[in-house]
Image (cartoon, rainbow, N blue to C red):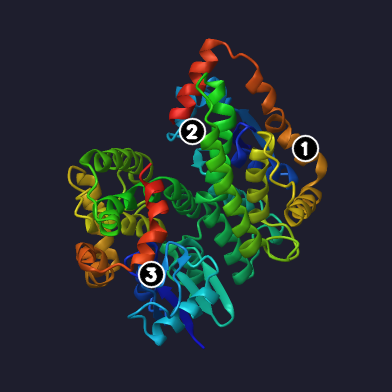
Amino acid sequence: MGLELYLDLLSQHCRTVYIFAKKNNIPFEFKRVELFKDSILGRKMPGGNNPGHSREGQHCREEFGKVNILKKVPALKDGVFTLAESTAILLYLSRKYNTPDHWYPSDIQKRARVDEYLSWHHTNIRTNAPKTLWIKVLIPLFTGQKLPPEKLQEVMDELAISLKQFEEKFLQDKPFIVGSEISLADLVAIVELMQPVGADCNIFEGWPKLVAWRSQVEEAVRKELFQGAHERILNAQDLRKVQIDPQMKKEMKPLLLKMLK
Amino acid sequence: MVVELFLDLLSQPCRALFIFAKKNNIPFVFKHVELLKGHHHSEEFGKVNVLKKVPALKDGAFTLAESIAILLYLSRKFNTPDHWYPSDLQKRAQVDEYLSWQHATIREKGCKIFITKVLVPLAGQPFSPETLEEAVEELNSALKQFEEKFLQDKPFIVGNEISLADLVAIVELMQPVGCGCDIFENRPKLAEWRSRVEEAVGKELFQQAHELILNVKNLSTTQLPPELREHVKQFLKT
């Protein structure tokens, strides 16, 4: 049995793993998880009772539950070994498949810089950037209501602080976060920043350094692969056409209200 | 030149570093950055960490922020025993998995309790019992996942020996304890795991690292002078 990666490319964390595996020619089976059907932010949907859910879809959901008890994507299955958390999966793959050094440099100071970014990212860009998609697309989709523009502005202001720190502390005047080559740090950062772009919030506008960095990263990854990975999120507005299960709407409401605070 | 660690033991990640360095006999200079006095805003500290947060490391000209990055850097530079960050691919992945997951769960919710119960009143602002209740509920949910997914029936998060995962977890869970929320009460599995971790680290070192946080309740009932209250207010904003 080969490597299985459970992914929904709507999720930034899944895109990192997908791009990394593809770029490094790591053979894997793409196990498609649909976030708004199979697992919503860790909440497992009820099984085959829902109309329109195929038996195959249910099987995938059950299988997914066994792979990752946290029921979040991405998840990895390598034989009997299962793993959650994109950072852990990226590092595991880089070690198992001996990917080129620049992804996670063996030099301990450069490696520390990657670790430093990966850690900081969690509580900064990762908390702010996705909110744009929630506010502009997902919450209106679930509640049928549009949110006041101040809400979005609040999030954009918070994100601007993170972007400033990103430029000043992590990028500075270098082409990539850790010097002259792309690493896991750049990959993790870029996919997160594409989330607002998917929500039609052009966060790169007014940040020329970031724009230049984004170009470098796309180039290093290969434009075609980058575009392919981002197709779903760049058409996130299409989600508006999706009919959400009423049960799902009910379950999500308290979580969404919390997100708004 | 000896490594400098910029720490305030009120902070959970600082405690993890302190314990790790001491336990592994890593020589370092303890540079005290008193958060409640606003030391982290000093220009001098800003040169060490432009993000103005503790912990931070200075090793010659090399500076580093983020406790997990620092822990890993020290483990590599000083070749610490394998169990801290096992070379076995799958065990190492399990440590990485915990270290990643804990940011937005155990760490975030534990911090929320500390801020609500201790810092907000210290800053002279009204205490919100609803916010505290919400924070406790969220932490309870995270603890459930911790027991079911990460600890299960094992002595430590990654098998039979203590690793960075357990160290990072325990210091975070001591924060609510210091605030008077004994999350180990009525959780026998967790309490047993805590005992094992304390034993593995060394009880004396564990107590030493936690002395400040375990006495933080005394801070909250003392009237802070206005300048200090202002510092705490500033701290809450950052």
Q: The disc numbered 3 marks a residue on which chain?
A: A
Q: Of discs 1 and 3, which sits in the foreground?
A: 1
Q: Position of residue B45 (x, y in %)?
A: 49, 28
> Circle 2 sits in a helix, a strand or a loop, which is it?
helix
Q: Position of residue A101 (x, y in %)?
A: 44, 65
Q: Which residue is drawn at 55% across and 62% down?
A: B97
Cα distance in 3D space between marks 1 and 3: 43 Å
Cα distance in 3D space between marks 2 and 1: 28 Å
Q: Which residue is drawn at 35% across and 54% down?
A: A189
Give the residue at mark 3.
A20
Cα distance in 3D space between marks 3 and 2: 33 Å
Q: Of discs 2 and 1, which sits in the foreground?
A: 1
Three-letter amino acid code at the position of disc 1: Gln
Q: Of discs 3 and 2, which sits in the foreground?
A: 3
The tag earlier along the polypeptide, 2 or 1, is 2
Three-letter amino acid code at the position of disc 3: Phe
Give the residue at mark 2.
B48
> Circle 1 sits in a helix, a strand or a loop, which is it?
helix
> Circle 3 sits in a helix, a strand or a loop, which is it?
helix
Choose between A61 and A233: the one closer to the eye.
A61
Give the residue at mark 1.
B207
Q: Is residue B209 above or below residue A32?
A: above
* Position of residue B233 in the picture relative to residue A137 (left or right): right
